[in-house]
Amino acid sequence: MGQAYAVTAEFYDLLQAAEQLAVSGRLLDRWLGSPEVGVLDVGAGTGLAVSLLARRCAVPVHAVEPAASMRAVLLSRIAGQSEVLPRVRVHARNVQDLGLVGVADFAWCLNTMAGLDVSDRAAALRALATALVPGGRLVVQRPPAHAADGRRDLPSWQLGGDLYSGEVVTTPVGADRVRWRFSYRVSREGALVREETEVFDGHLATESGFDAELAAAGFTVVGADDPDIVIARR
Ligand SMILES: C[S@@+](CC[C@H](N)C(=O)[O-])C[C@H]1O[C@@H](n2cnc3c(N)ncnc32)[C@H](O)[C@@H]1O
């Protein structure tokens, strides 16, 4: 994972947090329940959900995040929050190498599975199953089933008279892969001040294929939600 997210970490919250928080809040209202053992956030990123989870639950929160740039934002987010810090443990590694057993009865993994190929997904789902106690709930976003050529604007924000904006360009790569090119721009009085780009490779999976991967790891699918969310029981 070395330098992955090195560019994106600077812009992620500014451009994407509002959308992510709205989706996460709605999903947690519906699916979190009342964890009694612990909660796990896999691909915790900048800690948007870690913060929500820590405020909504009284149990330990395990945040799994391999990218140093994203962890830096996560740690800044919770720094100084004395009521939260004792319960958040950050695991600076890939979920495939998590190595935790029975530490949680709720696991959360959004916007992350698409970055893993089929064998890493299998290892990730096995690690998640091992980390959950029997009966534990997993809320996971599927990899996309299709990738169509396209371009989408990210939300933009004014900061001190500068406009921060971004776009993502999606390009299919062969039958089962996709490439996302994120461009981030800072403009002043209509002129570009700087532009940064980061490219991510993703992997597609059919709904039935991903359900079968969940089953192979010991999960039973029990529900679904938007966007592309699967609820599974360990
Ligand atoms: C697109 S971000 C999403 C962050 C957060 N879940 C959200 O929805 O805002 C994906 C995150 O997954 C992390 N990630 C990538 N591969 C991972 C792996 N194998 N195990 C755990 N996290 C991983 C990345 O470093 C990144 O922070």
Image: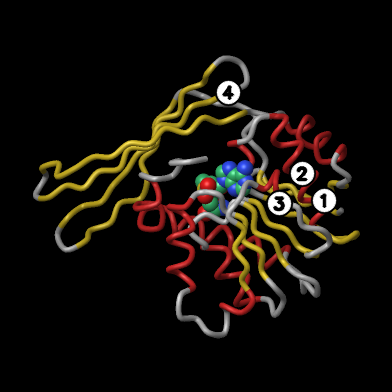
Give the labeled residue for mark 4. 177
Q: Residues within 10 Å of mark 1 (few under 14, many from 20)?
A: many
Taking 188 as reference, is 199 left or right?
right
Which is closer to the viewer, label 2 or label 3? 3
Give the labeled residue for mark 3. 98
Dot 2: what SS? helix
**Which badge, 4 or 3, is on the more N-terminal residue?**
3
**Which badge, 4 or 2, is on the more N-terminal residue?**
2
Q: Residues within 10 Å of mark 2 (few under 14, many from 20)?
A: many
Amino acid of disc 3? Leu
Taking 224 as reference, is 44 left or right?
left
Q: Position of residue 9 (x, y in %)?
A: 40, 51
Determine the image quadrant of residue 101: bottom right
Which is closer to the viewer, label 1 or label 4? 1
Taking 229 as reference, is 84 left or right?
left
Q: Position of residue 7 (x, y in %)?
A: 36, 44
Q: Which mark is residue 129?
A: 1
Q: Position of residue 221 (x, y in %)?
A: 84, 46
Amino acid of disc 1? Ala
**Which badge, 3 or 1, is on the more N-terminal residue?**
3
> Are discs 4 and 3 less than 8 Å apart at CB?
no
Amino acid of disc 2? Leu
Q: Position of residue 192 (x, y in %)?
A: 14, 41
